[in-house]
Image (cartoon, rainbow, N blue to C red):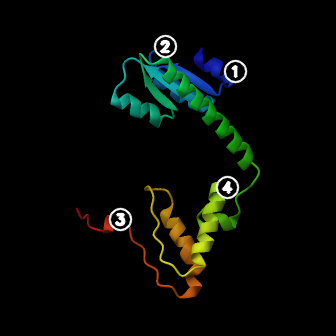
């Protein structure tokens, strides 16, 4: 019933109980992801564990909330989900038009959002200057791609370049 309604109406936000008749909220969450991948799904439960929370987030829940919950908290959470859904819709409309060129793919960094355009501008500015650069950030965010792009643009300047990761440096305390 839940899946049928979600497919028929394509809601932006879904509040889903983890314990339902017929199928668990976790199973429904996985099915809903296939039906409506952009829906913000808030999973609710009175019997949550750390593992359930991790699984819910892994399967794409917007958030996971324990019962009993404060009505103000669920209202704030729902408003955040609505805002995220609107942002996702807006981003989808803005980025639907541009296509990815072979040059972009060969360069290794792909993006057309205004934030990525700012990153590209910084790459150009840094590559054109004679400065030492330290790139920091979370694992998997593209630091090495940025370093390669800077090097590729600046390689004609005969600047010495070295690459290292924080794992290579001993921790000092």
Q: Which residue is mark 1?
A: 8
Q: Which one is earlier in the sequence, the residue at label 2 or at label 1? A: 1
Residue 95 drawn at (x, y percent): 71, 49
Q: CA distance from mark 2 to mark 4?
A: 45 Å
Residue 173 drawn at (x, y percent): 22, 62
Point out the frontmost of discs 2 and 3.
Answer: 3
Residue 114 has which mark? 4
Closer to us: 79 or 34: 79
Outermost residue, left side: 173
Q: CA distance from mark 2 to mark 1?
A: 20 Å
Residue occupying the point 24% across, 65% down: 172
Q: Which one is earlier in the sequence, the residue at label 1 or at label 3? A: 1
> Does residue 47 sit above or below 61 in this rendering?
above
> Does residue 136 sit above or below 49 in this rendering?
below
Q: Which one is earlier in the sequence, the residue at label 1 or at label 4? A: 1
Residue occupying the point 37% across, 23% down: 48
Q: Which residue is mark 3?
A: 166
Point out the frontmost of discs 2 and 1.
Answer: 1
Proximity of marks 1 and 4: CB atoms separated by less than 8 Å: no
Outermost residue, right side: 97
Q: Could you tell whether 159 is left or right of 6 in the image? A: left
Residue 90 drawn at (x, y percent): 70, 41
Residue 85 has which mark? none
Residue occupying the point 60% across, 14% down: 1
Q: Residues within 10 Å of mark 1 (few under 14, many from 20)?
A: few
Outermost residue, top side: 21
Q: Which one is earlier in the sequence, the residue at label 3 or at label 4? A: 4
């Amino acid at each position: 019933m839940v899946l049928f309604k979600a497919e028929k109406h394509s809601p932006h936000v879904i509040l889903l109980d983890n314990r339902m008749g017929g199928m668990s909220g976790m199973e429904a969450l996985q099915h809903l992801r296939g039906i409506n991948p952009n829906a913000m799904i808030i999973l609710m439960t009175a019997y949550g564990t750390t593992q359930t929370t991790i699984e819910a987030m892994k399967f794409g829940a917007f958030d996971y909330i324990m019962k009993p919950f404060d009505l103000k908290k669920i209202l704030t959470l729902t408003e955040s989900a609505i805002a995220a859904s609107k942002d996702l819709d807006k981003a989808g409309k803005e980025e639907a038009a541009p296509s990815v060129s072979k040059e972009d793919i060969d360069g290794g960094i792909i993006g057309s959002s205004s934030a990525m355009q700012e990153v590209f501008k910084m790459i150009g500015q840094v590559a054109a200057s004679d400065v030492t650069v330290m790139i920091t950030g979370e694992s998997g965010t593209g630091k090495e791609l940025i370093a390669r792009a800077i090097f590729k643009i600046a390689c004609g300047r005969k600047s010495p370049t070295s690459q290292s990761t924080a794992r290579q440096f001993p921790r000092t305390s």
